[in-house]
């Protein structure tokens, strides 16, 4: 035993080494710190890229917009044989915009991520362009896609346009017949960089994009030709949100929500992996399919409406979107209805029998609502002889949570 005041033997200072558990904890914390640092550096790098792209886009777009505004009459009548001496190019370069003083001399045509800024002006309706009644489309884009680690970076491209407050469009995740998608005013210009990876950054009119989703400003609508497809093989949730109207000649598809303050119109089909909602009409010539709620503030017209068989435990079960329909495990159809005297509160209630006027018809079989419309000038009261319900089904009028609609349905008794 060591006496008080004497030294401990050499090497017996009382310290102990790290245990394996303590070393593992230290290494784990160090790894977390390294990941955090890497993520922080990635964030700073992405923000720097977005800021520089936004700066370049904003300057070129403003100059090109001023160019189109100043020379609109000449640009819109450029193909008129009576117009002589037309010298305004339809694809002005940044150098030409600088020489004409639409851009400052410090402006550069070089993109921060490589490539060069290009400007393209086209007649919106090439077949009918009567003088000043002609509509022009303006597109500003990079001739080299925005990339990150060898892959197209749509989030950086769209984020830059959003930051620049410049309405924007970009090519789809996969080649989409060489065209830009999600562009307002039926823009169908071919991809300016054919056979190149997508993620071309562009700008025109009142369209804005953020991340992978499409968002429209308060003043804008989205009419376009062809399909609007925001789905991909990776299963990420892409949404389409319109502040006004969504109107397409083709399909509307999204992994996320499809919503509009106004109306949603597709001359083909509407498909959402979550919810579909509009304060106005929802119209589809073919099918409307959603994995969650379907809500129309006004009229709902569909060749076929497909909803999931949501498990409803009975009357009074809370729900979120008034007007949505669902079924319990026995097949009873419920509608999400506002609760009286309880603002902003809704519950699932059995679909009630129809009363009053009916001017449409459809069929509910299983979890599918097959809805079609008839001439609204036809006044239908009581039993609608135009409907032949299957055995075991009874006629009802569809209730959207606020009022009876003109959709007449057959419900299992």
Image (cartoon, grey):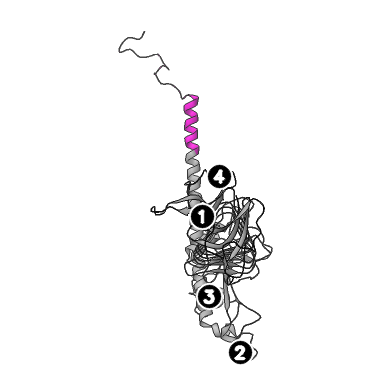
**Quarter of the view holding residue 201:** bottom right
Kindly report the distance in space between the C-alpha atoms of the residues bearing marks 1 and 4: 43 Å
Q: Are marks 2 and 3 in contact (CB under 8 Å)?
A: no
- Pick whichever of labels 1 and 4 is earlier in the sequence: 1
Kindly report the distance in space between the C-alpha atoms of the residues bearing marks 2 and 3: 21 Å
Looking at the image, which is closer to me, 387 or 141? 387
Dot 1 crowding, Cα within 10 Å, few <14, some 14–19, many 20+: some
Kindly report the distance in space between the C-alpha atoms of the residues bearing marks 3 and 4: 55 Å
Q: Quadrant of the N terminus?
A: top left
- Pick whichever of labels 3 and 4 is earlier in the sequence: 3
Q: Label 4, on which residue? A: 311
Q: Could you say whether the residue bearing mark 4 is in a helix, strand or loop?
A: loop
Q: Label 2, on which residue? A: 85
What's drawn in magenta, residue-wise? 2-31
Dot 4 crowding, Cα within 10 Å, few <14, some 14–19, many 20+: few
Q: Are marks 1 and 2 in contact (CB under 8 Å)?
A: no
Q: Could you say whether the residue bearing mark 2 is in a helix, strand or loop?
A: loop
Q: Are marks 2 and 4 in contact (CB under 8 Å)?
A: no
Q: On the picture, is 200 further left or further right than 349?
A: right
Q: In the image, residue 94 lies at what x, y percent? A: 55, 74
Q: Label 3, on which residue? A: 64
Q: From what the image shows, is residue 373 above or below residue 350?
A: below
The secondary structure making up most of the magenta span is loop
């Amino acid at each position: 035993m060591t006496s008080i005041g004497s030294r401990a033997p050499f090497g017996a200072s009382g310290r102990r080494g790290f245990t394996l558990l303590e070393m593992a904890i230290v290494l784990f914390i160090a790894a977390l710190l390294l990941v955090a640092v890497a993520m922080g550096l990635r964030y700073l790098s992405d923000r720097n890229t977005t800021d520089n792209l936004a700066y370049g886009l904003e300057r070129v777009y403003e100059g090109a917009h001023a160019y189109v505004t100043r020379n609109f009459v000449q640009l819109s009548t450029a193909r008129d044989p009576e117009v002589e001496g037309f010298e305004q190019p339809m694809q002005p370069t940044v150098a030409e915009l600088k020489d004409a003083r639409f851009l400052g001399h410090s402006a550069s045509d070089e993109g921060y991520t490589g490539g060069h800024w290009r400007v393209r002006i086209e007649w919106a309706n090439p077949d009918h362009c009567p003088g000043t009644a002609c509509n022009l489309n303006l597109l500003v884009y990079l001739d080299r896609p925005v990339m990150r680690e060898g892959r197209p970076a749509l989030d950086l491209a769209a984020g830059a346009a959003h930051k620049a407050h410049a309405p924007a469009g970009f090519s789809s995740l996969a080649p989409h017949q060489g065209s830009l998608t999600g562009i307002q005013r039926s823009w169908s210009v071919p991809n300016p960089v054919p056979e190149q990876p997508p993620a071309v950054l562009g700008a025109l009119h009142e369209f804005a994009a953020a991340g992978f989703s499409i968002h429209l400003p308060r003043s804008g609508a989205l009419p376009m030709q062809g399909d609007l497809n925001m789905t991909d093989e990776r299963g990420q949730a892409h949404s389409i949100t319109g502040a006004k109207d969504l109107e397409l000649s083709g399909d509307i598809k999204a992994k996320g929500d499809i919503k509009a303050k106004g109306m949603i119109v597709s001359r083909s089909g509407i498909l959402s992996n979550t919810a579909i909602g509009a304060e106005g009409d929802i119209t589809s010539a073919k099918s409307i399919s959603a994995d969650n709620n379907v809500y129309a503030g006004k009229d709902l017209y569909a060749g076929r409406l497909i909803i999931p068989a949501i498990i409803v435990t009975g009357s009074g079960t809370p729900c979120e979107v008034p007007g949505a329909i669902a079924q319990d495990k026995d097949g009873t159809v419920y509608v999400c209805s506002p609760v009286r005297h309880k603002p902003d509160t809704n519950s699932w209630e059995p679909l009630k029998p129809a009363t009053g006027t009916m001017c449409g018809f459809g069929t509910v079989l299983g979890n599918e609502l097959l809805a079609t419309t008839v001439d609204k000038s036809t006044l239908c009261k009581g039993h609608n002889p135009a409907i032949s319900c299957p055995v075991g089904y009874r006629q009802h009028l569809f209730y959207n949570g606020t009022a009876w609609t003109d959709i007449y349905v057959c419900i299992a008794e």
